[in-house]
Amino acid sequence: MVKKKKTSAYRHLPRRLEIVYEDADLLVVDKPAGLLTEGTGNQKTRTARYILTDYVRKGALKSRKEVFTVHRLDQWTSGVLVFAKRLEVKELLQEQWPQVEKKYLAVVHGQPAQKEGTIRSYLAEDKKYHMYSTKDPAQGKLAQTEYKVLKETAQFSLLEVKLLTGRKNQIRVHLADLGHPVVGDRKYGQSGREYPRLALHALSISFRHPSRGEPMTFETQVPGYLTKLMRG
């Protein structure tokens, strides 16, 4: 297995985006909190995809080179993010996505009574693009999230979270359902206005290389913000 960790030698791109790994097929980056994965109606240039497309074009504006989004992270979630350099590579990666292992770190309010477990529900989306849990499989899609408490303080808990499915806002909704929302989550948790960012980080991702078939794991460093929260 090839295992890659982020080091200070990795290249820094605009808006604190860092390249963790690159080859002819893949671009794996460490996305900072606050940066969109790809464009929206109001914002098309301050995104990871735009920055990386500019990077592969090397300043040649008329170049047809581009990167393709394999998966997304919420704007205020940091961590490992995978892009493909060709459409067929994106499709190969997405075919194996149910088997891809994704680990996150989350700092949540309070201390869960059960120190590890699996949260299951069906997630649906309302007209305001707000995700919510339902018990009715006809209304939503099955979502499963594993969690384990790693550390506790008087105010917070640090959780390792593993996605068994990949629904929109899944971790944030499930941890809020548990009664322990992610610190800084203004959408599904407490007001969070005293916190500068969402305390959720995509720590690692493991999959088979789309061309070579070898197992690969990419792991990023824990943000200082999460460490600071857990100092008690």
Image: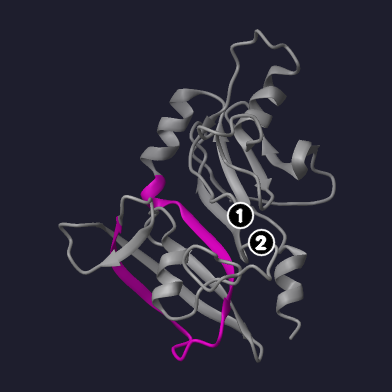
Could you tell me which residue is drawn at 74 percent across and 67 percent down?
225
Q: In which quarter of the image is the C terminus?
A: bottom right
Secondary structure under badge 1?
Answer: loop
What main secondary structure does the magenta stretch of the protein show? strand
Could you tell me which residue is drawn at 66 percent across and 61 percent down?
197
Q: In this view, does 96 lie above or below 191?
A: above
Q: Indicate the position of residue 172 as horizontal and vertical percent values.
A: 47, 65
Label 2: which residue?
Answer: 197
Secondary structure under badge 2?
Answer: loop
Q: Indicate the position of residue 206 as horizontal and vertical percent values.
A: 53, 52
Residue 68 in the magenta stretch? The answer is no
Give the left or right position of residue 129, taking residue 18 as reference. Answer: left
Type of amino acid at the residue the image marks with label 2: Arg
Magenta part of the chain: 97-124
Residue that extends furthest to the left in the rendered view of this protein: 138
Residue that extends furthest to the top in the rendered view of this protein: 62
Q: Indicate the position of residue 138 as horizontal and vertical percent values.
A: 15, 57
Could you tell me which residue is drawn at 61 percent across and 68 percent down?
184
Could you tell me which residue is drawn at 53 percent across and 74 percent down?
190
Residue 123 in the magenta stretch? The answer is yes
Q: How crowded is mark 2: few (under 14 residues within 10 Å), some or many (20 or more)?
A: many
Q: Residue 76 carries which label?
A: 1
Comes first in the chain, label 1 or label 2: 1
Q: Indicate the position of residue 228 as horizontal and vertical percent values.
A: 76, 74
Type of amino acid at the residue the image marks with label 1: Trp
Give the left or right position of residue 15, taking residue 202 as reference. Answer: right
Q: Is residue 120 above or below residue 163?
A: below
Q: In which quarter of the image is residue 198?
A: bottom right
Q: Name the one closer to the observer, 153 or 43.
A: 43
The reply to whether the C-beta atoms of the residues labelled 1 and 2 are less than 8 Å apart is: yes
The colour scheme of the drawn protein is one colour
